[in-house]
Amino acid sequence: MLAFQTRGRAIADVLRRRIAAGEIAPGSQLRQLEIAGEFGVSTTPVREAFAALRGDGLLVLDAQKRLLVFEPTIDEIVEIYEIRRRLEGLATRRAVPNLTDADIEELESIYADLGELTGIEYVDRNRELHQRLYRCSEMPQLLRQIDALQSASVAYLSLLSAEPAPNTVTPAQQEHRAILDRCRDRDVDGACAAMDHHLRSTQAAIRELLLRS
């Protein structure tokens, strides 16, 4: 049983990254037998992987009982970010007073990496930055809810992180810098305001992307 669970997690991780990178497009159908054949496994770990991705909100079951990659509408993205702003605002408010100097230095290290990354590598490291901060809130139930909502929008974030022009500082970099500066000062209200501005800006960018598509 453990072997199946381990395989299922591994398959889910591969599919999650493919979805985030846009290699599996939103709206695509995933079939158990095809995935099982690709990975050389039975359908049991594939079912487990699909269940994990449904739990993340990355797969949805349509009226014909087909498993499709989540394809949010503009209204759904707006809703996701409205909820994220409130949950991540709470996580930031609870985290900042608990930050140690070691926490700040680790956040700065992740931030420094972001300037060198694009695409899915940027998305993964960006998510790590947020999660590293929120972990200091010491609210595991809240973190699980935030993680699920982040998963629901991850495929669109990778499209926003294309190669920037040389020697430019992106709006997201400026926003992360503002968040970390407020965290370093232990400015709770300032950090919450900077986080809210960052999430609003990301929401607007994804909405514009969907309007153009």
Image: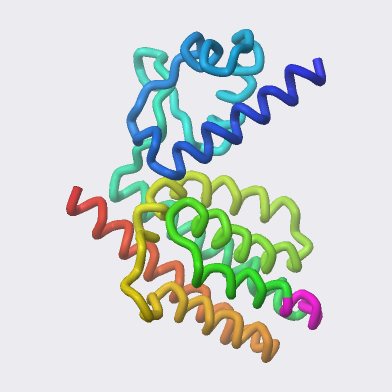
The colour scheme applied to this rendered structure is rainbow
Image x and y of residue 36, in percent = 55, 13
Horizontal placement of 67 versus 41: left or right? left
* Residue occupying image coordinates x 37% and y 70%: 201
The residue lying toward the viewer, choosing from 195 and 15, is 15
Give the vertical position of 134 relative to 181 (above or below).
above
Taking 181 as reference, is 141 left or right? right
- In this view, the residue in front, 136 or 93, is 136
Image quarter hosting the N terminus: top right
Residue 20, relative to residue 88: is it above or below? above
Where is residue 184? Give x, y as percent: 68, 87
Task: Evaluate whether residue 98 shows in this view.
Answer: no
**Who's the residue at 64% across and 71% down the image?**
92
Q: Position of residue 111 (x, y in %)?
A: 59, 73
User: In front here: 15 or 175?
Assistant: 15
Residue 33 appears in the figure: yes
Image position of 37 with respect to 189: above or below: above
- The stretch in magenta equals 99-105
> What is the number of callouts on the image?
0
As drawn, is 57 to the left or to the right of 28?
A: right
Q: Is residue 12 left or right of residue 120?
A: right
Q: Residue drawn 65% across and 11% down? A: 44
